[in-house]
Image: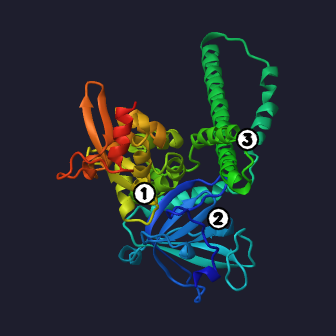
Amino acid sequence: MAGNFLPPAELTPSGRPVLRPGEVECTLLSAVDLLSEELPSFPHLKSGILILTTHRLLWLPGETIAHVNSSYFIPLSAVQQILSNKKSIKSMFHSPRIRFHLSTSEDGRVSGNGVGAKSLVFTLIVRDKTDTDSFLEKFWDVWRSRAWESSRSNSDQQSSNLGSGHGSLEIRMPVVGVAGILRKEQEMWENTDKSLQEAFQDLNALMSKAKEMVMLAEKMRSKLISGPSNQGGGANDEETATKEEMQDWLLSVGIVSPVTKESAGAFYHQQLSRQLADFVKIPLERAGGMMNLIDIYCLFNRARGTELISPDDLLQACSLWEQINVSVMLRKFESGVVVIQSKSHSDDEVFERIRKLVMQRDALSTGISASDAAMTLGVAPAMAKEYLLTAEGKGLLCRDISPDGFRFYVNLFLELDPHELYRVKEHSRYSAWSRAVLNP
């Protein structure tokens, strides 16, 4: 079993890997085998998805349904050497292979921190027709960057910049003739190059600080979400409202490692679908289990920052939810409005709240509008109108169209007996409506 040799990878409910603080996805390969020819007891992991991040190599099973117990990772800190591919006639007739040395224990285990006593060769066999050389190049670049280590490059660069500030003490030669003009031009180019380097250093520092702020915001949001469940019922409404507002603000901070076409490749829409399913969980809970697709599109793009997606990408990602085991689904009303809905969401609960609303004394005589239902259900008026139209289709409501718009009333025709039209049954909807109209 591979779990005896490799540490397990933690996955989200939709099958996306849970990234560590500061970890970012770099690229992805499909149909990849993982094996070790020097360790016969190591199982042959076949046709999985290989994800390269700045900290780890993650191997996930290729099935659409995520298997938490069969996903593993290799820390890049355990990689001792990456072997270069040797081009030969034999290599032209079999799948590309990527070999690398791993630091393991005496029994072949790879620890999570990458510390080991001996070195073993592990092999990646790429079955899919992808650019293996490009992946190998990124593998080299990520491994050499050693992003998992606490780097002080920014402070070192700043100190080096301060230390190199003795240029102002140099003796400047006078500008004389053609040589002086050329010297002046060269100084201008050097100053411009120095300014650009400083600007990019500041930009890199800003990007690193932005990642730290996103990670801090995620920690605060998780604490806010788990806070009410751990505490008793002593919190007042004002404190609860403040926490909800803080959650909304933190929700828009951003996604640490958004899925891109460059990193996911051919699996872009599948990985985007899984990441979207994880993202919409909290907004759906806040919205009562259903949200308009346009609202999700705006929230998701705002969280992705500069890595924006198109409406077609969003629709295609949502359509893949039927093939993977996630807790959300795409729903289309008869009017054509498309929404994202949680699978645990029940229309019967919504219809019961609408029934109580239309049975109120004022609603029995004047009816309700989409705005009234929106205030009661806590959703947008467009979504409330779809609920009312669906309730009408089930025979729960009747609709009146006037210049002021749609008004919905309780359906009394279900209780009318064609043989006894003038008989009013006690404790019925018709009797409640009669009392409300005759005794306003």
Which amino acid does the dot numbered 1 rest on?
A: Ser
- 3D distance between C-alphas at marks 2 and 1: 45 Å
Position in image of residue 235 (x %, y %): 73, 45
Residue 164: quarter of image: top right
Q: Is residue 403 above or below residue 299?
A: above
What amino acid is at disc 3? Asn
Residue at 32 percent across and 48 percent down: it is 391
Q: Nearer the viewer, residue 243 or 87?
A: 243
Q: Earlier in the sequence, mark 1 or mark 3?
A: 3
Q: Residue at x 39, y 36 (%)?
A: 363
* 129 to 297, vertically: above or below: below
Q: Which of marks 1 and 2 precedes in the sequence?
A: 2
Element under disc 3: helix
Please determine whether, in this image, residue 270 is positioned above or below residue 120.
Answer: above
Q: What residue is pinned by disc 2?
A: 76
Label number found at residue 424:
none
| Horizontal side, residue 106 vs residue 312: left or right | right
Q: CA distance from mark 3 to mark 2?
A: 22 Å
Residue 154's label in the rendered image is 3
Q: Residue 308: percent from the left, percent from the top?
A: 45, 41
Identify the secondary structure beneath mark 1.
loop
Q: Name the residue: 40% across, 56% down.
A: 348
Which residue is identified by label 1?
346
Whether residue 381 is visible to the viewer of this picture, yes or no, is: no
Residue 123: x %, y % from top left? 53, 76
Which of pointers 1 and 3 indicates the residue nearer the eye?
Answer: 1
Asked if residue 172 is positioned above or below residue 52 in the image, the reply reads above
